[in-house]
Image: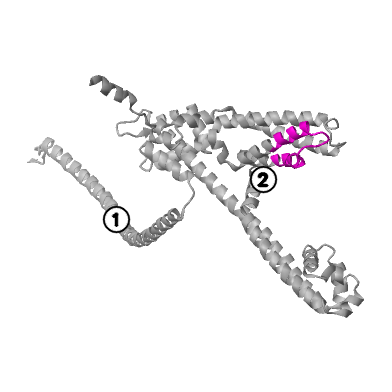
Amino acid sequence: MKDALARRQQKRPVFDTVFHQLNADFQEDLDRRKGHIANSFKFNTAIIVLILLNALVTGLEVDQYRGDSLEDRLIFFVADFGFFLIFFGEMLARLNQLGWDYFTDAWNVFDYSIIVLNCADLVITVNSQGSAGLKLASTLRCLRLLRVVRVIRGVKIFHNLWIIIQGILDSLRTVVWVGILLLIVTYCMAVALTTLLIGDRSAREHWRYCEQYVGTPWRSMWTVFQVITLDRWADIARPLGQVSPFALILLILTIIICTFGITNLILAVMVERVHTIMEESSAVQTKVLERTEFDVLKSMGEDFQLAELNADGELDFDEFQKILRSPAVVLKLRLLGMQYDEAESIFRIMDADKSGSVSPEEFVMGLQKLRGDARGQDLVALICCAQRQASRAVGLVERIKVLNAKADVIQERLDRIGSKMTGEILGRRVTAERNTQVWEMAKDRQDVIGTMDKCRQIDFPTLKEEKARYGILY
């Protein structure tokens, strides 16, 4: 029983995964295709040179034509065989790179068809005597030059050339419809021209080329087409105008409608498409630049986060200058088109509180706003902010005027108080001088009183000496 279960488990079918069944491309396959030799710049450049050389050899073969036999064109046959081997090897290399996806590209199918026709041409040339093989295949080999158009798509030098080619290719559908319109108008004009002259015997007698140019509608169509292209149209219009003025008016209307109208419409469609492609290409380049700048700014933010931040999680100016001098940040600033001093000025602008520190997020956001284009929302916000500041400034001016008036009143009061204080100070000074004089006089009085006291204490009355005169004592 166990052996039977084991055999059943061994016979259980193994199915591929959903990704393998859907032929999904894994990252390993994409990396292998990207690193393949067929995707290298040198390989593609060599193929372009060989394509140009093959076209040159084909032109020389036609110019030096001597015959259809193999002996007459042996050198060119050997060169053609060598080019066949090279391009066959290129096809094998691209098949190894892309697998069956090789045939999903129309250019690859076109190149594969040319290689098959070239191989058939070589086989028929060898096996058939006196035959040049498939001349159509030899002619189609020059169409391999169209592959150069695909290769120059990714070359920056030929970017403008590719835009013109792409514009022409994209406008082919419109050109086809315009061509159909031109064909209809040409047919209508040809029928009208033939109708005017088919029964006019006088026109046939006086203009001998009437049957040649306007004898049937098809001949008239060729005539109208010649007039539209302005190819010696006067040689037709002048004699036609002499025999039928209405036919001349019809030709002039044809020139106005077709030459100046419809054919220029084709040019206008191509120019408009080229202009649209240029705008789309410019928009794509702008998006790529914005994405690249965003990645650079994000990388700069990571560099600032690795720096030594202060306690508040902000970056001071000294540490900021140290980071700016690092080679990685200098390269990133150069990619952003900024200089060292510009980054410092942004730091000072972001430091609104003059604290000398800014958070890394704020600095990176300031750089991003500085690098970005001014949007309508930003301009409206700037205008509103300017208007608010202007109205605030007007209010401040009015307040300053009121304060100036009050200051003038206060100044007048202070002037009056000053004059009164000056008079009071002068009065006090006079009073002080008079007080000083009074005190000096009082001092003199006190000195006099003191002197008198001293004299009173020292001097006292004494008896006078008696003198007898005449028996009388005096």
Q: Give whichever of 399, 395 is nearer the camera.
A: 395
The Cα atoms of the two marked residues, 1 and 2, are separated by 93 Å
Query: Is residue 250 toward the left or the right of residue 269 in the image?
Result: right
Q: Quadrant of residue 93?
A: top right
Q: Residue furthest top?
A: 3
Q: Residue at x 52, y 36 (%)?
A: 335
Position of residue 353 measured from the top left corner of the image (x, y, whole percent):
35, 42
Residue holding disc 1? 421
Residue nearest the observer in this picture, 372 or 240: 240
The label shown at residue 161 is 2
Q: Position of residue 278 (x, y in %)?
A: 60, 50
Secondary structure that dominates the magenta span: helix
Q: Position of residue 328 (x, y in %)?
A: 48, 28
Is 421 a magenta residue? Answer: no
User: Residue at 73% across / 68% down in the picture?
Assistant: 187
Q: Position of residue 338 (x, y in %)?
A: 52, 38
**Residue extent of the magenta highlight:** 117-144
Disc 2 marks a residue whose amino acid type is: Leu
Q: Secondary structure at mark 2?
A: helix
Work out whether residue 145 can be spotted.
Answer: yes
Q: Which residue: 49% across, 29% down?
A: 31
The disc placed on residue 49 is none
- In the foreground, 184 or 56: 184
Residue closer to the observer: 153 or 174: 174
Residue name at image x 32 percent, y 56 percent:
418
**Quadrant location, the N terminus:** top left
Magenta stretch: includes residue 132: yes
Tell whether 140 sits left or right of 210: left
| Amino acid identity at mark 1 | Met
